[in-house]
Amino acid sequence: MIDIAIGFFIHPLSYITPLTEQLNDWVYLILFIWIFLETAFIVFSFLPGQSVLFLTGTIAASTNSRLNIFLLLITFIFAATSGAMVKYWYGRNLDQKNRLARKINDSEKMNQTQELFDDNTRKSLIFSRFIPFIGLFVPIIAGTTQMDWRRFNKLNFMGVLLWVGLCCFSGYFFGQTTFVRQYFTLIFLMLIIVPLIFETFWRKIKKHTEKI
């Protein structure tokens, strides 16, 4: 059992790729639900998003994989777009008397996202998914500010295309290299940890500049 756990940690693709084969086409439904939950509900924000896009793109690059990169793109684009729509309507119909709503509104991340959204609405909707935690609240703020539904959908779709396309194709093209396959676990962890470190440093720098 320990040997399997160590083997999975060192060479996860050797275990995950056969699993996707066993699931057949059901894997697309599972991935849709995964990304939809991660993008639609704050309570599921702990689920890794872009690292999963990179992972599945890497698996699709394998010669013995049945995963199709274009079907993955369609699945993820539909899931992320619809997930953001759910958050938008949640923000638009947000009841300020609701305990959860007050907790979200009073959070530091929400305030930071509000500042970013106010400074540049277009860029925040397109690029916020690449910023840890900040991207979670942008659709909600778009709803609370009564942003035009058509404009939100347009910018949201552009952001989803960029996010899904960049992450999936990065995994697909770089996943074919020996380096990525050899150090996949390290790269996968870096995709999760590095954005968190960057966000922490950015927050400290911002606080320092505010004191000056």
Image (tube, helix red, strand yellow):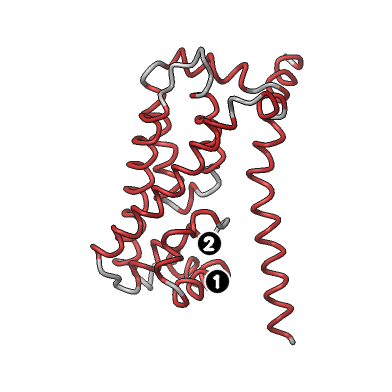
- The image shows residue 181 at horizontal and vertical percentages of 66, 24
Q: Is residue 130 above or below residue 176?
A: below
- Quadrant (top left, top right, bottom left, bottom right) of the N terminus: top right
The answer to whether residue 79 is left or right of residue 199 is left
- The image shows residue 20 at horizontal and vertical percentages of 48, 19
Mark positioned earlier in the residue sequence (1 or 2): 1
- Quadrant (top left, top right, bottom left, bottom right) of the C terminus: bottom right
Camera-nearest residue between 167 and 46: 167
The Cα–Cα distance between marks 1 and 2, rounded to whole angstroms, is 7 Å
Residue for point 36% across, 42% down: 77
Residue for point 51% across, 15% down: 63
**Mark 2 and mark 1 in contact (Cβ < 8 Å)?**
yes
Q: Amino acid at mark 2?
A: Ile
Residue for point 41% across, 62% down: 125
Report the number of discs.
2
Circle 1 SS class: helix
Camera-nearest residue between 76 and 133: 76
- Residue holding disc 2: 134
Q: Is residue 16 above or below residue 206?
A: above
Residue for point 32% across, 48% down: 82
- The image shows residue 165 at horizontal and vertical percentages of 44, 42
Q: Is residue 37 above or below residue 120?
A: above
Q: Amino acid at mark 1?
A: Gln
Circle 2 SS class: helix
Camera-nearest residue between 137 and 131: 131
Query: Of the numbered discs in the image, which one, if any, rests on residue 112?
Result: 1
Question: Badge 1: how crowded within 10 Å, few (<14), some, or many (20+)?
Answer: some
